[in-house]
Amino acid sequence: MTIIDNAVYVDGIRSAEPRNLEQTFETLTEHGGMAWIGLYRPTSAEMAAVAAEFNLHGLAVEDAISAHQRPKLERYDDNLFTVLRPARYLDETETVEFGELHVFTGRNFVVTVRHAETKVVGKVRHRMEGRPDLLRHGPEAVLYALMDQVVDDYGPVVAGLENDIDEIEDQLFSGDPLVSRRIYELAREVIHFQRAIHPLPAMMQQLRRGFEKYRVDTELQHSLRDVEDHVERLISRADSFRDLLQNALTLDGTLTANRQNEASAEQNEQVKKISSWAAIFFAPTFVAGLYGMNFDHMPELHWTLGYPMAIALMAGTAALMYAVFKKKGWL
């Protein structure tokens, strides 16, 4: 059994550490309290054993085994099945790395199932064990604390995304050809992050609807509302990131088009100059070629001023064309 931590808490104090699930169930029967079992990548057989001990619903167990679930909260009788997506930002690769945390909560138990390396559960357990006054409220307190920790860990992710977006705004005007790819990749990470946080408000509304029915402590209600406010701020910022990246992509397209137009205009100017000089040199070449033909009857060849006239014609034509092109601004 891949049990990371297994403990029974009575009045918020860690009272027993059973070696297996059977002992956990026996301890709960004898002493009451709440069991908190932490699992890491359990097999189907291991999850089946947990489900049998705590009467977990088959659909929830199947989701916990297969993983790759979006954040959600489902109620099966008096048990809750919650899926959370812890995240951290990797600045070196500019990517958001997501984990997956499944939480089963019942009347007197909490079962956490991790499918990735994350310190969320360990942090929350350590913090809650230092606050028996909160832990004594039972599984609801643990669930709210886990949600609070996951949402708090989204803070550095938002900060990392915001910093990279600021860098992109500076990079846009540098003419870097790789900025478009960077915008696309960062936008993809923002979309993945939005998928992790957008379901959270609906999940918390589900929990709030059960406050009266399940007599949730007032302090826990305030705690959940605080988490909900934090989530709303995160969603607002994440949505603004997507808008900023879309605007950055549009601006990059405009700047790229302008640079291409400038390059095309410069190229056209060069073509004009080359064409102008080619035309100027064509006139003398034409005259020289004309009088270089080997015909017997060419009167100009026997004129005394024929040679000076040919030179003057070539020079005059070239000068005239130079003046015309210069006036047009081609030279």
Image (cartoon, helix red, strand yellow):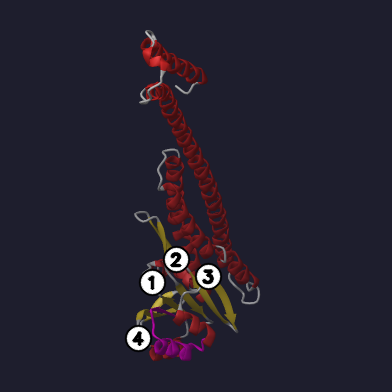
Q: Residues within 10 Å of mark 4 (few under 14, many from 20)?
A: some
Identify the secondary structure beneath mark 4. loop
Q: Amino acid at mark 4?
A: Met
Residue corresponding to mark 1: 116
The circle on residue 1 is 4
Whether 316 is drawn above or below 81: the answer is: above
Q: Quadrant of the N terminus?
A: bottom left
Q: Viewer-nearest of labels 4 and 3?
A: 3
Marks 4 and 2 close (CB-CB < 8 Å) = no
Q: Nearer the viewer, residue 154 or 287?
A: 287
Separation (CA) of disc 3 from disc 1:
15 Å
Residue corresponding to mark 2: 86
Residue corresponding to mark 3: 71
Separation (CA) of disc 4 from disc 1:
17 Å
Q: Residues within 10 Å of mark 1 (few under 14, many from 20)?
A: few
Task: Work out whether residue 110 can be spotted.
Answer: no
Identify the secondary structure beneath mark 2. loop
Q: Residues within 10 Å of mark 2 (few under 14, many from 20)?
A: many
Q: Nearer the viewer, residue 302 or 331?
A: 302
